[in-house]
Amino acid sequence: MTFQSNESHREDLKLVVYEGNFALVTEKRKLPTDSSQWIRIQDLPQTIDLNSLILNEIAVEEWSIQRASGVSQLTILQALTGEIILFGAEGTPKERHRLIASVPDLVLKNIRTKEILLNPDGEVAILSIPPTVSNLHTFLFRVDENVWPNAFTMTYLTNELSWQAHYLVLLGKDKMKVNGFIEVKNNTGSSFINVSLQTMAGETKRIRQEEPTYIQQNKSMMLMDSSESIVTEEGEGELHLFTIPFRVDLHDQQSTVIPFIDSILPYRLYYVAIPGHEHPISTIAWKHDSDMPLAKGIMTFYYERNDQVLFAGEDRISYSPKNKEIESQFGRAVDIDSEYALIRRYKSGEDTIEEHEYRLRNGKDQEAEMVIIHPFYYKTWELIEASEDILYQSASELQLHTTLAPEQSKVVTFTVKVKKK
């Protein structure tokens, strides 16, 4: 006797969506009172990792997997070889024929006339799709009937479930408003209804072979309202788990968007000048002081000026714990000019002296904070003098800080000694 387990028997469903386009699925399904020797499961996602399925609470003695064939004209006709189908010219009543062969040629036998038709012109119709033709895999488990609980739990990995974080940042005069969203994309071919959802930040290693899938792309997006609940985060080793505090529906070919951060923070806007670029890089720095860490994702920046919102640019951020100082670069300031030149190089004993210059001009109608980042590729060097404040210095880099008033031009100079190797 075989028990056919399907989603109507589901009591609970949990998903943990990982980076890497896959998810861990945990389902709890009830069992009937009477025990069975076999359990058949035929409704798991098309994109399941076939080697990952685990059944708990029942004693599995053996199992088999019938891989999905995919629903197509070829697979249907191959499965119906030897069976009765309907055939006739287009627009005319169809007659019963026996399907003799479908590959490499279509061969039919008319039941009424006994004629054999070879590659006939016309339309084929079928009475039903054979049960062996499916986009879904079939799992058949032989179990110990003496171990028969009220329910069992199964856990498996499935591909084509992914998540990422998006951040919308509105840059005001002194502060910025940050709204963060978790977007979960379901391309598995199956829907997950009333699911307990978590997303995992961090890299996990997987070794697997690609399985064929039969999925149509028809995407949509849905925004979930989380105004009365708060997404929480906890760490597990190198991984970080974000828990959605309410159950969601993840429909196939749909993106579900869940708000998880809403903060107003002070920020600092400055411009980074580097050699070889005539306009500096627009950069903001701020301290993420929210209790909720930032998952890696894309930040989209807007300027708020005179009751108008203007697109400023985008940047990617990595995972950022609370209280971390964060910098984002999102474009170039075309109204600020930066021109670099090596003015002079000469010998001083066994060493070499270099004189460097940056010509800066602020075309804005407001003050501009500037940071010059100049790289060095020498093994040993030292700074002799600089016309502006030193912000940072290392073996490979010098950073200088200055401020330009509106419409101001300034020449920043520094001199270094390159020591003989």
Image (cartoon, rainbow, N blue to C red):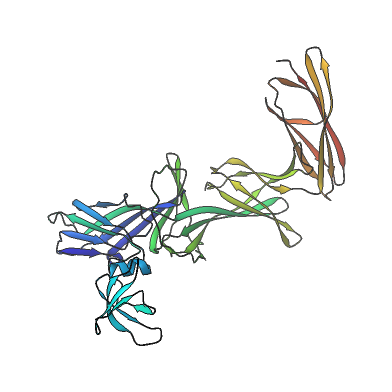
Horizontal side of 156 relative to 296 (left or right) equals left
Residue at the extreme top: 349
The number of numbered badges drawn on the structure is 0
Location of residue 352 with respect to 291 vertically, above or below: above
Name the residue rendered at 35%, 65% in the picture. Answer: 104
Name the residue rendered at 82%, 15% in the picture. Answer: 348
Please state the horizontal and vertical placement of residue 55, each as a whole percent of the image.
Answer: 25, 52
Q: Tell me which corner region of the image, top left, top right, bottom left or bottom right, holds residue 109.
A: bottom left
**In which quadrant of the rendered image does the N terminus lie?**
bottom left
**In which quadrant of the rendered image does the C terminus lie?**
top right
Q: Tell me which corner region of the image, top left, top right, bottom left or bottom right, holds residue 318.
A: top right
Please state the horizontal and vertical placement of residue 283, each as a whole percent of the image.
Answer: 70, 44
Please state the horizontal and vertical placement of residue 91, each as a whole percent of the image.
Answer: 40, 86
Please state the horizontal and vertical placement of residue 221, each as a whole percent of the image.
Answer: 52, 65
Horizontal side of 201 relative to 211 (left or right) equals right
Name the residue rendered at 75%, 37% in the picture. Answer: 274
Residue at the extreme left: 146
Looking at the picture, tell me which residue is in the foreground, 277 or 151. 277
Location of residue 337 with respect to 154 vertically, above or below: above
Location of residue 13 with respect to 352 vertically, above or below: below
Horizontal side of 310 relative to 293 (left or right) equals right
